[in-house]
Amino acid sequence: MRAVLVSRNEDKVRELRAILAGWEIEPIGALELPEETGATFHENARAKARFGRSAVDPEAWVLGEDSGLEVEALDGRPGIYSARYGGLGATNEANVAKLLRELETVAETARAARYVCELVALSPRGDETRARGTLTGRIAGEPRGTGGFGYDPVFVPEGSRQTVAELGAEWKVEHSHRARAAHSLAEALRTARPPL
Ligand code: IMP
C-alpha cells in the first residue's frame, strides 16, 4: 500500500516506515504545514491528514500522525505541546530538561506517564480511519541511552528498568505507542476492505 505521511519529524517517518514495513511511505514534511491548533492528538492528526490531501494527488492515501507525552503529576502536560514544551523550536534536550525540572520535587514512584499516538488515514475517496496507541510507564530521574528521540532517554516503560532510549529502535518497532497505533490502523483498514 502506498501512502503519503504528513510529518515534519524525520524520526517519526523513520519509525513508521520500519513499523509498516509492507507500505510505501512517502513523507511530505517539507511543505509548510499549518499551525497545530487542535485541542487533542486526534484533531491535530486529522488536520495534518486533511492538509496532506489538499497538497498531494487525489489518488493517494494520506496519513496524519500526532503524538506526545502525558505526565500524571503534571495534569497531563506536556500533552499536545510535547514538541514545543521548552519553547517554540525547542530541542529534544531542552524539552527533557524542562520536564525534569518540573518533576524535581516529585518522587520516582509518583512519576507515572504515558505516550500517546493518534493516526488518521484518509482514503482517496476521503473516508477516514482512526487509530490510537499508548505506552504506559514513568519518568526517570535522569536521561539514559542514545536510541529513539524526544523524551525516550527519560521514559521507562512499565515492566522495564531501562529507558526507551536504552531499549532501542528494534524494541520501539514492536512495542511503542506508534507501533501499537500503526498496527491497529493497518488491521482496521484490512478488515474494512470489501472482500475480493
Ligand atoms: P508532534 O510532531 O507535534 O506530534 O510532536 C511530537 C512530540 O512528542 C515529539 O517532538 C516528542 O517530543 C514527543 N514524542 C512523540 N513520540 C515520541 C516518541 O516515540 N519518543 C519520544 N518522544 C516522543
Image (tube, helix red, strand yellow):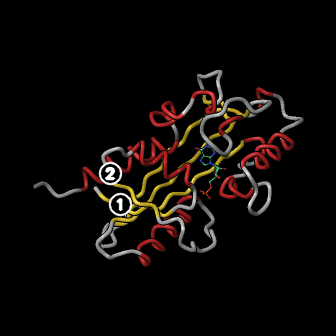
Report how far apart the C-alphas of labels 2 and 1 lie in the structure: 7 Å
**Residue 55 appears at what percent x and percent y?**
44, 77
How many labels sit on residues?
A: 2
Q: Earlier in the sequence, mark 2 or mark 1?
A: 1
> Which residue is tagged 1?
3
Mark 2, secondary structure of its residue: loop
Q: Where residue 101 sits in the image (x, y, percent)?
A: 86, 42
Mark 1 residue CB less than 8 A from any atom of ligand 1: no
Instruction: In the rendered view, tell whether residue 100 sits above or below residue 131.
Output: above
**Is label 2 in contact with label 1 (beta carbons under 8 Å)?**
yes
- Left or right placement of residue 58 versus residue 115 in this view: left
Position of 141 compared to 20: left or right? right
Q: Which residue is rendered at x = 52% and y = 35% of the image?
A: 169
Crowding at dot 2, Cα within 10 Å, few <14 / some 14-19 / many 20+, comes out as some
Q: Residue at horizontal 77%, vertical 41%?
A: 73
Task: Pick the quarter of the image with the C terminus.
Answer: bottom left
Q: At which x and y percent is residue 4? A: 40, 63
**CA neighbours of label 1 inside 10 A, class few (<14), some (14 to 19), many (20+):** some
- Would residue 154 be found to the left or right of residue 175 on screen? right
Tell me the residue at 84%/34% (across/down): 106
Image coords of residue 48 (percent x, y): 51, 67
Q: Amino acid at mark 1?
A: Ala
Q: Is the residue 195 above or below the residue 178 in the image?
A: below
Q: Name the quadrant of the N terminus.
A: bottom left
Q: Could you say which is closer to the camera, residue 93 or residue 101?
A: 93
Three-letter code, disc 2: Trp
The residue wearing badge 2 is: 23
